[in-house]
Image: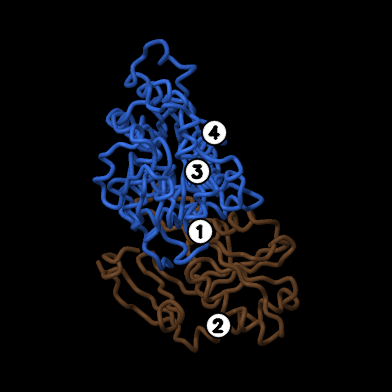
Chain colours: A brown, B blue
Amino acid sequence: MSAAQETRLVHKASLMDQLGVERALTRMAHEIIERNRGAEQLALVGIHTRGVPIAEHLALLIERFEGTRPPLGKLDITLYRDDLTEIALQPIVKRTEIDFDVTGRRIVLVDDVFYTGRTARAALDALIDLGRPDVIQYAVLIDRGHRELPLRADYVGKNVPTSRSEVVKVRLESIDGDEGVDLLELAA
Amino acid sequence: MSAAAPPARATRKHLFDLADWTPAEVHALFATAEVMAQVLTRTIKKVPALQGYTVGLLFFEDSTRTRLSFDRAARAQSADVVTFSAGGSSLSKGESLRDTIQTIDAMQADLYVVRHPAAGAPRQLSNWTDASIVNGGDGRRAHPTQALLDAWTFIRNYRGADAGRIEGKKLAIFGDVAHSRVARSNIELWTKLGGSVTLCGPNTLVPREFAELDGVTLTGDARAAAEGAHALMALRLQKERMAAGLLPSLAEYAARFQLRSGLLELADPDALVMHPGPVNRDLEIEGALVDSERSVILKQVEAGVPVRMAVLYTLLVGKR
């Protein structure tokens, strides 16, 4: 999002504060452990940029509850986007850092906001190019609806009905200095 | 919603030479090349980034490594490739350059890689098509992707003090600078990134006017050129030059200007040996040096694909 666009956004509502984020991630960590019957074979892969610290946070919580810390990876989906022939801005390609073999793993893809589903689609393609995981699941802090593809998340921090003119902004300690989720609206 | 680094307004459409590229743009391209290199280490060495794009390879002059690596760079990003080589074309039947590009343009390529014996041909072609143009070598003028991959190879492989950057490093180029587009582009890029360049060869092959460029020194003494150099690059000596009277004999040339192990001892202890290829062993470079552990000559060839992938990505994506 360009800086010019950013300035035309007005704050509408606070969706989560730091404690809310912590509680949601704690519940999601328990759900991940429950669904996968422990942390064996589990690996978390955060989607650049904000999926990465969320995945780190989930990995710490899983370690606290299970005693083992699942390996962590970072996935950049730029080269897999389906709009590269149409866009007017060039996205910066970042490194994918997945140091373990994904084949045979139970992989949880992690992102901040689930919206059209196009990022998730690209992430699935990017991940499958690296090997053949046993299972791929999807965890998101916020699901804001408006899917354009037949996809759903396995773990959701909070479902938030939104309109398309609204923007969900996730703030994370390691990137933004504090933690929380806000609903913003484009000023007319 | 989640973009820490802001997308860049893609202003570059063509790559004719590196004259107006900023160091920041070059470093951004190198960062993209790193990602592309990683893609090439995977089991599936292909990404869909340029799906739906067509890259035309227009080679009006022979080339093996440049054409192969551009071909691979395009296909590894899922672009379609159409290839045109002057040998088997209507050019030999007297068709003009302009007619040729207009015929080829019917293939609707989004980008053409052009190699041509005439300096300035790629820029001229850009007047006749809406597609992007990448210079794959024009006459003696420029070979920008070779310079990019040479600098990138140095940055990734140099292990001495203050590694990972060109700034403050000395590049010594040995040989036929006068006829070399590789040398011209390397001088341009290396000095732009804050390094210095020393050119060494017989007076007939090292034009005096290069001494006027910032950061460039000329010498006829190979030992002085090698002194403290962080990279030593030999250029291919074309044997035709001797016929043209520019060289007394190949043996005399080799005795005075060959890049040899003895020179390496005067250089930086971690200096790298480079050559843009193809190599004449034991003519411009001592054969044993080509295979030595200080040589990155094969790494230069390997760097061709990721660097050219980055060039294609940078020029094509974000244009609509």
Q: Work out whether A85 lies above or below A28.
A: above
Circle 3 residue: B259
Q: Chain of mark 3?
A: B
Residue B50 image position (x, y, % from top left): 48, 44
Name the amino acid type tagged 1: Tyr
Query: Element at badge 1?
Result: loop
Query: Element at badge 2?
Result: helix
Name the amino acid type tagged 4: Asn
Name the amino acid type tagged 2: Ala
Quadrant in which residue B17 is drawn = top left
Circle 2 residue: A24
Residue at 35% in and 74% down:
A184
Name the amino acid type tagged 3: Leu
Circle 1 residue: B158
Residue at 38% in and 23% down:
B245
> Do marks 3 and 4 both belong to one polypeptide chain?
yes
On screen, residue B52 versus residue B199, left or right, reads: right
Q: Chain of mark 4?
A: B
Q: Which mark is residue B280?
A: 4
Q: CA distance from mark 4 to mark 2?
A: 66 Å
Between residues A181 and B53, which one lies in front from this camera angle? B53
Query: Are the two marked residues, 1 and 4, in contact with CB atoms closer than 8 angstroms?
Result: no
> Do marks 1 and 4 both belong to one polypeptide chain?
yes
Quadrant position of the N terminus of chain B in the picture: bottom left
Q: CA distance from mark 3 to mark 1?
A: 19 Å
Residue A56 image position (x, y, % from top left): 57, 77
Q: Chain of mark 1?
A: B
